Image (cartoon, rainbow, N blue to C red):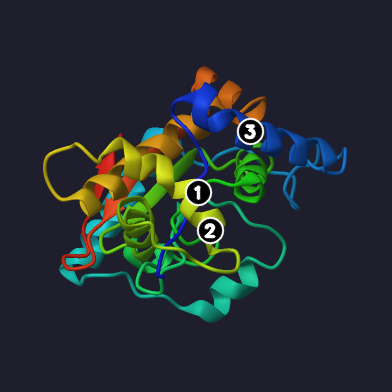
Amino acid sequence: MCDQHHSTEQHLPRRNFLQLAAAAAVGSLLPGNLFAAPAADGKPTPTVMPAQALEKLRAGNRRFVTGRGRDYDFIPERESLVASQHPFASILACADSRVAPEIVFDQDLGELFVCRVAGNFADPGSIASFEYGAAVLGAPLILVLGHSGCGAIKATIDSVKKDTRFTGHIPYIIRSLRPAVEDVLETPGDIEANAVRQNVILTVAALRKVGPTLSSKVKDGSIQIVGGVYDLASGKVDFLV
């Protein structure tokens, strides 16, 4: 399975409450000074606004699609990042080996704060990471990135429609993605493509509601949370803002 899982919910009472509660519990267990501490060099302030960060991703993806990526000199860049990091965007991406955000968006080391899990769904670990990215590192944008040909979505469709069973921990992924698949069972068009898109939509909606850090920052406009779907064939990201 190339991608697998999503346990965030748009329909909060039915789908999201337990997971977001778990995320809050994780946050309560983090060291008390974690979100009070600034970045290593004392600069947690975003270098760009959310809209500017989104445009940087759009521009980078255009370069990737056209094969006109920037040139990088990694030796001085590595040295400059030893003391601290100031990413302009956080990304929740699939673990699929064909979906690498730094390449897809033509960005250098230190520019993207990335969490990857099969199925690009938000679990307590990724939620806590995005809280850290927003509150400590100052990243003003969170992007949930789905993609075409998602193996996790395919497996979940098989589970829902054919009652296919999986062993080990894979059922956790299936349970997380199941709401997105069930939402589009009666939707016209390709069920896999529809489910990939719905999975992104549900995850974005759920992340926007996670308190106290993300929801408050969304409300005051200091961060923006958006979605996107990456097409494996063209390399283009369709942004869902």
Q: Nearer the viewer, residue 20 or 157?
A: 157
For label 3, the SS is helix
* Precedes in sequence: disc 3 or disc 2: 3
Percent across and percent down for residue 157 are 32, 54
Percent across and percent down for residue 97 are 41, 74
Q: Which residue is painted at 16% across and 65% down in the image?
A: 234
Disc number at residue 171? 2
Q: Which residue is painted at 47% across and 62% down in the image?
A: 118
Q: Which residue is painted at 26% across and 39% down in the image?
A: 184
Say which residue label 1 marks.
175
Amino acid found under the numbered disc labelled 3: Leu
Q: Nearer the viewer, residue 98 or 17?
A: 17
Rounded to the nearest angstrom, the CA distance separating label 3 from label 2 is: 17 Å
Residue 182, quarter of picture: top left
Discs 3/1, front: 1
For label 1, the SS is helix
Discs 3/2, front: 2
Q: Is residue 239 shown left or right of residue 179?
A: left
Residue 43, quarter of picture: top right
Q: In the rendered view, would you say 117 is above or below 89?
A: below
Say which residue label 3 marks.
18
Percent across and percent down for residue 162 are 32, 57
Q: In the rendered view, would you say 28 is above or below 66?
A: above
Q: Are marks 1 and 2 in contact (CB under 8 Å)?
A: yes
